[in-house]
Image (cartoon, grey):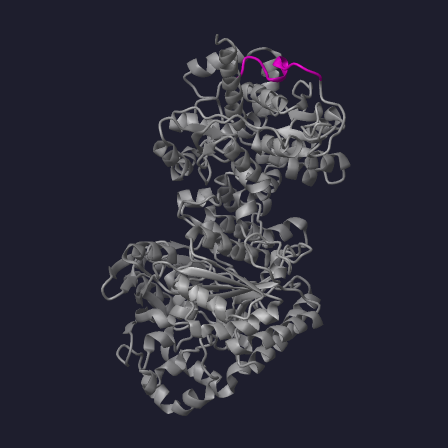
């Protein structure tokens, strides 16, 4: 019998691409975006079609199964495998050619859909199918699943848009298939000829979303033109590996318009959807109010949406079409948007609402498994009523939404997949739902494929004769059965291989398991306000994505592939380049918080051992800075840092140390210490102005106290100019948010520091204004998480405000100085992820600051950029959005960055001084005062 080691050695000898049978490589692909987990022998990244053929020959000779894998976003388990996984994204990801006249493109399977769409957009073209994972799903994966997306109402499925495929089978044979029998494997034509009756009368009636099984097999009928390539689509890697595809492109409408129709309830919207199809829509999407968390109602309540409790989003090629839809629809209310910005805003409501489908109203996770059943559109209303009744009967919850114009419904359901009783309920519900879908003439899968989640139930939909024909079809292409076994034909049970069963019943395991693998963190194109995942965008390596790290932690807890437990070197290596930006906390659809997971891992990883020197120098920064201040040695330290030829031990030699302030912030403040009367947001005096003396505590964070006291003094001027009674705790550095201890995983030390902080601070009278975003985020979220049994922690967390929030809530009538300048810079990652910047945006607008800080991450991220081995990634992160925005800024633009790390990165890499928002406002106040004094001196 051939051993895994022999297979690996043979593959290395035969292939030019990478071959990796190591624990980390295997752990990264045990799961896709489904509930399933299968452990492979190894991973191969072929360089070209020849490599693919060689890998398939080697594996066939050894009897090792093969599964091709693209972005790994399949939700039914079909992108996992027990043999060799072919990673087609690393090298086989090119757009080979575009023919605008013929409206075709030639692509490799690992090409991400958005890259194709961006490349053909200048020709006024696009690829019609557009699943929600368009920023990271690949063309090969779309072919494997016959993906659809929102616009398939107009432009069809992937199968409808593929004209030719180059396919390599398990033994390494190459086929080029399109229309007609040319390139077909031996015996296929004879198989079809022998089963013409079954194909003509035994298959369920066709409708646009009949994706399940080998649903395109009746495309091989002579009257349908023998569409070999179409029939291959949706085969989920069970027949062969696509190495190249010729795809059809469609023309983009120059001025699409969006009609949004409001209905009394979901049933009314679903019943209306089919009647809109004669208008020729590009898409008809539907959702109900429960997807919005109860924020909507018949009287409105969601900004921009018409009245109703359910809505249809109907995109038309032009405004005339959209208005015709409104006139013809029997809707409760409606609106038409023609401007792209307005349309994007409304689509964002729909897209953001879809993210809430991963959680139930009480915060429980909802899982895939039955995410995309479809019925003929005319049956959708009746199906949804029956579907909701079935959910209720099983005590389950889910929030349907989706492609109502094609009868395709997305829903995630709060299955309990960790207990035996919960798994039994999952099976019982699945069997009953399959019966329900079939009763409505539907398809178990409407766009994502069956995989392991539904393939076992395909006999309910197709009947035994068709299922036997499916088996014979696979055997013609793959007689040895080595291509993705367990999927579609002779499938595994739907309740086998569940990824939750290998995890311990611990809170941390529950957190890790929440990563469902949709891979939004694998988006590599810069742009937009999002942060996640800067290290992946810098390296392009799966292990440096949020999903990759979550998968490694999952396997560490399982202990089968990654066997080192908390001492695992594979996990430590992957987490080393996690910047702790917390971008995933807000940008990930399920709220994975990798920064917190990293802290937990480092806490255990280094328990009882000597840590890296940076954990003591940077991790203990507040203590070191407090000691230097007590010794009044800041000047000496600054001089030594400039003159010493040897860098500080444990820190990156590429980095200069920031200069310490000679005088800490609190040593130079005037006024009483913290304390005073509590105030309510929006308090007013008798004349309607801000309540004089409203008590506000200004938090002396470590960065403001010892490194940037000018920010603290500016904040005092701004807050007091707004009529607020500002106090500063006089604690000699004994209050601290614990951030540096958290980022280095010294959780016991963080808890000790936070308890000391609470003891020292005492009760706070009102809002606590925190200038450093990372400290504010730590106080608001990490403090109560680390000290859940201390009520003072929750009270302090609730009191935390940014400057903008403080001014908006407690001095709403204060007028900021008009600066009337362009502003560039960086929004701190933790502000983006935890605090939000809506109040800051409003304050900048009121001050006349035009423009937006850059999205993404600055790359310094506190201690990260100062640690050895991180400089290259740190610079790459800055070069993604921040540094280009600085170079493109007008010469007189103001540079704003509220985070000390961001300001340091801008200074060291951009060569300009960035300032906190309160500094810009304080300057404006000073200029206004100077102008007033000058006016007073005029004769």
Pick the residue in front: 373 or 278. 278
Residue at coordinates 36% horizontally, 36% vertically from top-left?
884
Magenta stretch secondary structure, dominant = loop
Confirm whether residue 149 shows in the render.
no
Q: Is residue 532 magenta?
A: no
Image quadrant of residue 181? bottom left
Counting from the top left corner in percent of width and height, residue 44 is at 38, 58
Q: Is 881 above or below relative to 650? A: below
Q: Is 646 above or below relative to 471? A: above
Please identify the residue farthest to the front as the structure is shown: 939
Q: Is residue 661 magenta?
A: yes
Residue at coordinates 58% horizontally, 68% vertically from top-left?
496
Image quadrant of residue 440? bottom right
Counting from the top left corner in percent of width and height, residue 598 is at 57, 42
Pick the residue in front: 353 or 12. 353
Image check: 816 left or right of 111? right
The boundaries of the magenta stretch are 660-672
Confirm whether residue 466 shows in the render.
yes
Image check: 675 left or right of 273? right
Counting from the top left corner in percent of width and height, residue 283 is at 45, 66
Counting from the top left corner in percent of width and height, residue 592 is at 57, 49
Q: Is 247 above or below relative to 891? A: below
Pick the residue in front: 76 or 319. 319
Quarter of the image with the N terminus in it: bottom left
């Amino acid at each position: 019998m051939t051993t895994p080691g022999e297979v690996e050695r043979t593959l290395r000898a035969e292939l030019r691409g990478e071959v990796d049978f190591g624990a980390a490589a295997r752990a990264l692909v045990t799961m896709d975006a489904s509930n399933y987990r299968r452990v492979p022998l190894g991973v191969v990244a072929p360089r070209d079609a020849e490599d693919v053929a060689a890998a398939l020959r080697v594996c066939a000779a050894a009897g090792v199964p093969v599964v091709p894998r693209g972005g790994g976003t399949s939700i039914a388990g079909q992108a996992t495998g027990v043999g060799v996984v072919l990673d087609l994204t690393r090298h086989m990801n090119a757009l080979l050619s575009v023919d605008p006249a013929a409206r075709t493109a030639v692509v490799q399977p690992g090409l991400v859909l958005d890259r194709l769409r961006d490349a053909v957009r200048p020709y006024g073209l696009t690829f019609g199918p557009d699943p929600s994972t368009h920023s990271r799903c690949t063309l090969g994966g779309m072919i494997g699943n016959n993906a659809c997306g929102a616009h398939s109402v107009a432009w069809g499925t992937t199968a409808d848009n593929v004209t030719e495929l180059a396919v390599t089978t398990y033994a390494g044979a190459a086929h080029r298939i399109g229309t007609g029998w040319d390139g077909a494997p031996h015996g296929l034509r004879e198989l079809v000829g022998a089963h013409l009756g079954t194909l003509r009368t035994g298959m369920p009636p066709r409708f646009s979303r009949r994706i399940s099984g080998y649903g395109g097999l009746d495309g091989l009928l002579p009257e349908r033109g023998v569409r070999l390539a179409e029939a291959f689509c949706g085969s989920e890697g069970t027949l062969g590996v696509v190495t190249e595809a010729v795809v059809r492109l469609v023309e983009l409408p120059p001025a699409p318009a969006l009609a949004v129709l409001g209905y009394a309830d979901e049933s009314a919207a679903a019943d209306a959807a089919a009647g809109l199809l004669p208008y020729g829509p590009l898409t008809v999407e539907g959702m109900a109010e429960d997807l919005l968390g109860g924020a909507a109602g018949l009287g409105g309540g969601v900004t921009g949406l018409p009245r109703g409790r359910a809505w249809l989003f109907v995109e038309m090629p032009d405004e005339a079409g959209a208005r015709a839809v409104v006139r013809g629809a029997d809707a409760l209310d409606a609106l038409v948007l023609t401007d792209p910005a307005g349309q994007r805003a409304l689509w964002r409501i729909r897209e953001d609402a879809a993210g809430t489908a991963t959680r139930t109203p009480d915060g429980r996770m909802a899982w895939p498994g039955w995410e995309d059943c479809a019925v003929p559109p005319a049956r959708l209303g009746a199906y949804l009523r029956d579907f909701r009744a079935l959910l209720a009967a099983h005590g389950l919850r889910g929030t349907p939404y989706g492609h109502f114009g094609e009868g395709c419904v997305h829903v995630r359901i709060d299955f309990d997949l960790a207990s035996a009783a919960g798994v039994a309920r999952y099976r019982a519900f699945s069997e009953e739902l399959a019966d329900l879908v079939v009763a409505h003439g539907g398809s178990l899968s409407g766009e994502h494929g069956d995989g392991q989640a539904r393939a076992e139930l395909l006999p309910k939909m197709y009947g035994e004769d068709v299922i036997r024909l499916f088996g014979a079809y696979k055997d013609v292409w793959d007689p040895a059965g080595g291509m993705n076994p367990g999927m579609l034909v002779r499938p595994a049970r739907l309740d086998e291989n569940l990824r939750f069963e290998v995890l311990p019943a611990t809170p941390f395991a529950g957190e890790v398991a929440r990563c469902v693998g949709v891979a939004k963190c694998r988006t590599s194109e810069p742009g937009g306000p999002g942060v996640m995942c800067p290290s992946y965008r810098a390296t392009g390596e799966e292990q440096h994505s949020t999903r990759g790290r979550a998968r490694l932690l999952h396997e560490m807890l399982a202990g089968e592939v990654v066997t080192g437990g908390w001492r695992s070197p594979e996990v430590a290596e992957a987490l080393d380049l996690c910047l702790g930006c917390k971008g995933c906390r807000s940008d990930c659809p399920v709220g994975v918080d990798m920064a917190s997971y990293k802290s937990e891992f480092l806490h255990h990883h280094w328990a009882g051992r000597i840590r890296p020197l940076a954990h003591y120098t940077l991790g203990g920064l507040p203590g070191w800075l407090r000691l230097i201040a007590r010794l009044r040695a800041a000047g000496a330290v600054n001089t030594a840092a400039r003159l010493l030829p040897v860098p500080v031990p444990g820190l990156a030699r590429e980095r200069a140390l920031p200069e310490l302030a000679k005088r800490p912030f609190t040593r130079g403040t005037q006024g009483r210490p913290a304390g005073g009367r509590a105030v309510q947001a929006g308090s007013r005096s008798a004349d309607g102005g801000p309540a004089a003396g409203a008590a506000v505590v200004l938090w002396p964070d470590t960065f403001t106290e010892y490194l940037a006291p000018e920010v603290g003094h500016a904040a005092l001027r701004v807050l007091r100019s707004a009529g607020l009674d500002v106090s500063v705790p006089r604690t000699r550095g004994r209050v601290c948010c614990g951030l540096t201890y958290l980022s280095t995983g010294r959780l016991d030390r963080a808890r000790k520091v936070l308890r000391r902080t609470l003891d020292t601070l005492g009760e706070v009278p009102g809002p606590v204004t925190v200038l450093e975003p990372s400290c504010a985020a730590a106080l608001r979220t990490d403090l109560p998480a680390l000290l859940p049994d201390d009520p003072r922690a929750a009270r302090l967390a609730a009191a935390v405000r940014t400057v903008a929030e403080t001014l908006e809530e407690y001095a709403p009538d204060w007028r900021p100085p008009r600066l009337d300048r362009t502003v560039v810079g960086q929004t701190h990652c933790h502000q983006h992820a935890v605090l939000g910047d809506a109040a800051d945006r409003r304050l900048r607008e009121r001050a006349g600051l035009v423009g937006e800080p850059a999205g993404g991450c600055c790359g310094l991220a506190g201690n990260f950029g100062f640690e050895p081995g991180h400089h290259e990634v740190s610079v790459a992160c800055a070069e993604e959005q921040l540094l280009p925005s600085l170079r493109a800024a007008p010469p007189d633009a103001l540079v704003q960055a509220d985070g000390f790390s961001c300001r340091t990165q801008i200074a060291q890499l951009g060569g300009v001084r960035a300032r906190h928002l309160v500094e810009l406002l304080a300057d404006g106040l000073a200029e206004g005062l100077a102008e007033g004094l000058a006016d007073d001196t005029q004769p």
